[in-house]
Amino acid sequence: MKKHLMLALVLCILIAGCTDTKSHSTGVYMLMDTSGTYAVELKKAQKILNYLLGVLAPGDTLAVARIDTGSFSEKDIVAKITFDDRPSTANNQKRAFMQQIDTFVNSVEESPYTDISGGILQAIEYLNEAGSGKKYILIFSDLKEELAKGYQRDIPLQLKDFNIIALNVTKLRGDNIDPKEYMTRVEDWRAKVEKGGGRWGMINDLERLDNIFTH
Amino acid sequence: MTFANMLHITASPALSVLIWIVLFLAALYFARRPFHRAIMSFSKIIYNAMRFTAASVLSAEKRLAKRNREVVMAAGLQNAERILEREFDRIGAAVTRDLEGYPNVHRQLSELITKLDEDYLSSADVPPSLPNWMPIIESIASIKHTGDSMVANMLAEINRSLTQQNKKAIEDYRNSTAARHAILNKMMPFWRKIEKSLDSIAKSINNIKKRSKTVDRYLDEYEKIRSESDKAARALSTSALTQFAIAGLVLLIAIGGAIINFNLIALPMSEMVGGASYIGPYKTSDVAGLVIILVELTMGLFLMESLRITRLFPIIGAMDDKMRHRMIAITFTLLAILAGVESALAFMRDRIAHDMEALRQTLAGVEQTGLTSSMIPTVGQMVMGFILPFALAFVAIPLESFVSSSRTVLGGLVAWLLRMLAFLLRLLGNVGFYAGRFIVNVYDLIIFPALWLEGLLRGSKSKKVGAPEMEMPEDSPLVEESVANYEETLKLKEQQE
């Protein structure tokens, strides 16, 4: 009887250990602002992406999308990939991804409007589908949203388990005259993200990119 | 009624306070005896409880110490038996090796001696002597001739024959001596052979004598352990402690080796089993790497058991030799295969690391100048991957020492802790007892005006009665007696056990 109990206990432990359904992969969706005032900063975004390619592991997901007039669209996804389980294949995929981004940065066209909310909605949809355990949306933008006439973006964001990190939030000319504008802009986004259940972060110093995954 | 109102029981606050103090002291005075009894009883309860508990703990400590001693002795006996067994095996092997060929040596010696005997006899042959007629011829030759030519001729002829015969005899003698010398020369190698054989026998006998002295020494030690003397117990405990420390240190080194080994194979394992799958919170590739190392350790353990170097699994040691040899072959082959696999994984690791470094440099936008194309690191990693499993196989030896000595060391540690606990309990009991007396004295100090008044009123008579504290025995003989009885009972029980 004792033996049977022990066996059952060992089996239970093994089953509990093997049936870990929690995903351990990381999903990163990077939004790149291509509006007129910000398009010049895209070379920096490329550096950030190179950093991400260096740190992401096999099985992780990475997607890059641009922010333009209407960003809630699959067409705005510049490149996307889920890295192979094998490190050697994943390395080759990373090289190909880097080439794709290089081509995009060299041929990008400026956008007249900046639909950040649409991009975030697209990112949520993509990362939820990818089923990543840890989800990061990186917004490479000055966070100034400008919507074209007729676009509705007053939808509450569902950001539970998401980390939203704003990168390289540059100060606009108006911000220098009245810094309150900049602070209000950042604060509005923080409130919007936290209201949606997400965690907000901001990194302006690109030397501290290792802080992305500590959020 | 507030506290302020209570102070104003008379018009004067000072008088009110004084009345309250008097009342308070009176109350304390009348409650003095019950208070003293209560405090003394309480302190005695603490004292007794602690003493009883300490006695129980000490009894447990004694039982544990006894058990520890038994374990130490058993381990020492087992070890001594193992050493003796090994020495007997060696003696057996030496006797088999050296004296197995003795009949052959004996036969050779007999043959050589026979041959020597024959040679000796042949060398002892007397050389042929001169013919018997020689004295006659000599006497004839000495006759004086008178000038007769015929006699002269005859004598000359006799002289010539005699000289010739003498020459021939000398020649024969020389030849015979040379032949004997040749025979004696031939005897020399036989003498040397005999000397060599005798040296070999002497060496074997010396070797056996030396080993028998070692056996005698081990037998003496064995006898000492069997007699369970305190000296032997102390020596064995010290030995166990040393073993524990050394084995622990070696195990730590082995753990370091295992970690390096793990790092060598964890990355390439992700190439084989995938780097994104998990078992629980751990990467499958990490678990797979760990499993390989653990399997290597297990194989090493079985190999050492099969070689009878360790005795963690008596069932393996008790197997018949044929089965044991098979097991040695199987475990060694598996270990060699795993070492080969590790070597291949180390090679793969080097390739992956090289590729990753190249990618990082590309991503950083720097030229790939730092990457070396030398094969030395690759070969180094492969060699390390091959050697480490065999090195880890030897972990079984310190592991056995650690396991066997840890029982003694932990037993000793627990016994020490129990002794410390008993000491603390006794200390607490005494502190509790004397704290009660201290409280009683402080109580009396507070009510000293009342006591002083009592003394005045009673006068010299009260002095005869004595102070109330005299009524309270400082150390109850009953308590001491009961504790002593309890300890004696425990001792008796131990003796009975």
Image (tube, rainbow, N blue to C red):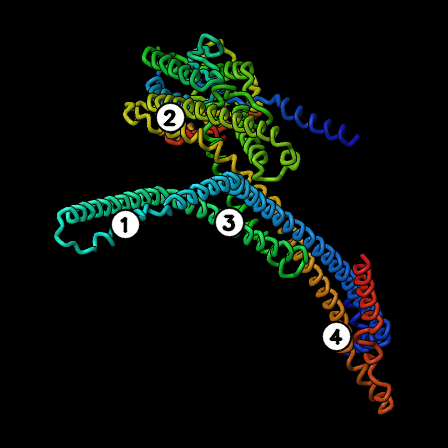
Q: Position of residue B268 (x, y in %)?
A: 46, 23
Q: Position of residue A47 (x, y in %)?
A: 36, 23
* Identity of the residue drawn at 28% across and 51% down: B136
* Discs 3, 2 touching: Cβ within 8 Å: no
Q: Which of the chains bears the disc numbered 3?
A: B
Q: Amino acid at mark 3?
A: Ile
Q: Which mark is residue B205?
A: 3
Q: Nearer the viewer, residue A25 or B295?
A: B295
Mark 3 or 2, closer to the camera = 3
Q: Which residue is mark 2?
A: A170
Gap between marks 1 and 4, in whole Å? 146 Å
Q: Amino acid at mark 1?
A: Met
* Discs 1, 3 touching: Cβ within 8 Å: no
Q: Which mark is residue B134?
A: 1
Asked which secondary structure carries label 4, the reply is: helix
Mark 1 or 3, closer to the camera = 1
Mark 1 and mark 4, same subunit?
yes
Q: How many marks?
A: 4
Q: Which of the chains bears the disc numbered 4?
A: B
Gap between marks 2 and 1, in whole Å? 148 Å
Q: Is residue B239 visible?
A: yes
* Discs 4, 2 touching: Cβ within 8 Å: no
Neighbourhood count class around disc 2 (C-alpha, 10 Å): few under 14, some 14–19, many 20 upward: some
Q: Farthest bottom residue?
A: B460
Neighbourhood count class around disc 1 (C-alpha, 10 Å): few under 14, some 14–19, many 20 upward: some
Asked which secondary structure carries label 1, the reply is: helix
Mark 3 and mark 4, same subunit?
yes
Q: Which mark is residue B442?
A: 4
